[in-house]
Image (tube, rainbow, N blue to C red):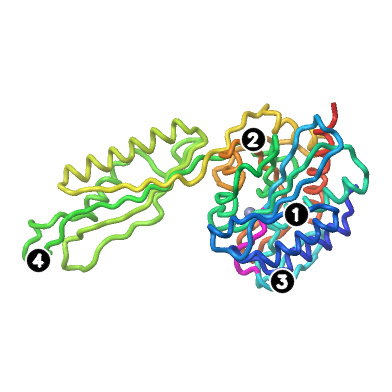
Amino acid sequence: MINENRLLNEFIELVSVPCPSKDERAEAELIMAKLRELGLEPVMDKANEKTGGTCGNVWAYVKGTVPDAPTLLFEAHMDSVAPTTGTKVVRKDGVLYSDGTTTLGGDDKVGVAGMLEAVHALKEDGVAHGDIQLLFTISEEIGCLGVVNLDKSWIKANYGYCMDIGGSMGEITYAAPKLYDIYVTVKGKAAHAGIAPEEGVNALMLAAEALSKLPAYGRIDEETTFNIGVFNAGIGTNIVCPEAKFVIDMRSLNVPKLEKLKDDTMALIKETVEAGKGQVEFEVVEGCPAVELSKDHPCIELAKRSAERLGFKVELKTTGGCSDGNYLCGYGLPCGLLATGMSNVHTTEEYLKESDLYDTARWIYETVKVAAEK
Ligand SMILES: [Zn+2]
């Protein structure tokens, strides 16, 4: 049984430790100490050699008693967005807040605390279960750097659950987009704007013309989005603009559709710019792979069964956001995202219902239990 008091105290302890991205060492050491208290042998990997952070990802393996049950991996990230140092938890009417000067850090300590308490309770209750892998990552908030730089051969699980998404208990996200960032540089030719404008090629205007020809932006359709959030150009009012740069963020749950959108967009920009005697360069950065599970994938079915058993209202969802779960899927681990209730994240108004903290731990506990049943 989940021990609410113990879980609450542990949550408060975890969010009280400073844990900015790239400097999660204190948090990681606290988590490793707690894992050792549970009789586990946590290991820290060396992902920080690539990220430049103060510690690596923390892994732990809980040996099960039911050998033919699937191995489940639960994952949460250790870092929180700033301001995150000196967090003091305020309890009010069954809801947890910060004192207003920092984020609460429920993103993602609700996942961390929930995983620790679930394993604690499973051991205490002597529940029969399969093997469990726990993964606590670094620097999720600045581009999922911990999971991007982990050694995928360390993943031993059949199914994964990323405990890092808002929403009500019972909400299961089975699809998340693949993302491309396309860095576009349009090159024209500088000239004096007053004396010889005809000798110049205005890159800013060519970029604007190309963008005005895009058939759509914003929400393209139910599963696809397209944004230009950065545009830089120009060096002086009296100079024909020689260079313009902008960045496209495009995402889709439908990977073939995304590939076509990428190719079509680049072709349209190239054609327009070249027709105006400019040149264009593209740098395509693959942001993250997609989460592409079907609604009846065994990984999703399992989370659904355990949620139903707990009386949660099950809802299968998709998201337009990217998380560590995308990368775990990219490594070949089917990984769903389970709602943890956190709200107003990335602001000092972040809050978490106490009941959602307890139910997050219950959901993990129950999923492990159900997975070992015949
Ligand atoms: Zn998060």
Q: Earlier in the sequence, mark 4 or mark 1?
A: 1
Three-letter amino acid code of the residue under disc 4: Gly
Q: Magenta segment range?
A: 77-84
> Where is ligand 1, by quadrant?
bottom right
Viewer-side label of 1, 3: 1
Residue that label 1 marks: 42
Q: CA distance from mark 2 to mark 4?
A: 61 Å
Three-letter amino acid code of the residue under disc 3: Asp
User: In the picture provided, is 125 more to the left or to the right than 184?
Assistant: right
Q: Earlier in the sequence, mark 2 or mark 4?
A: 4
Residue that label 4 marks: 194
Which mark identifies residue 334? 2
Check whether the beta carbons of the residues at disc 2 and disc 3 lie within 8 A of each other: no
Q: Earlier in the sequence, mark 2 or mark 1?
A: 1
User: In the picture provided, is 143 more to the left or to the right than 69?
Assistant: left
| SS of the residue under disc 2 | loop
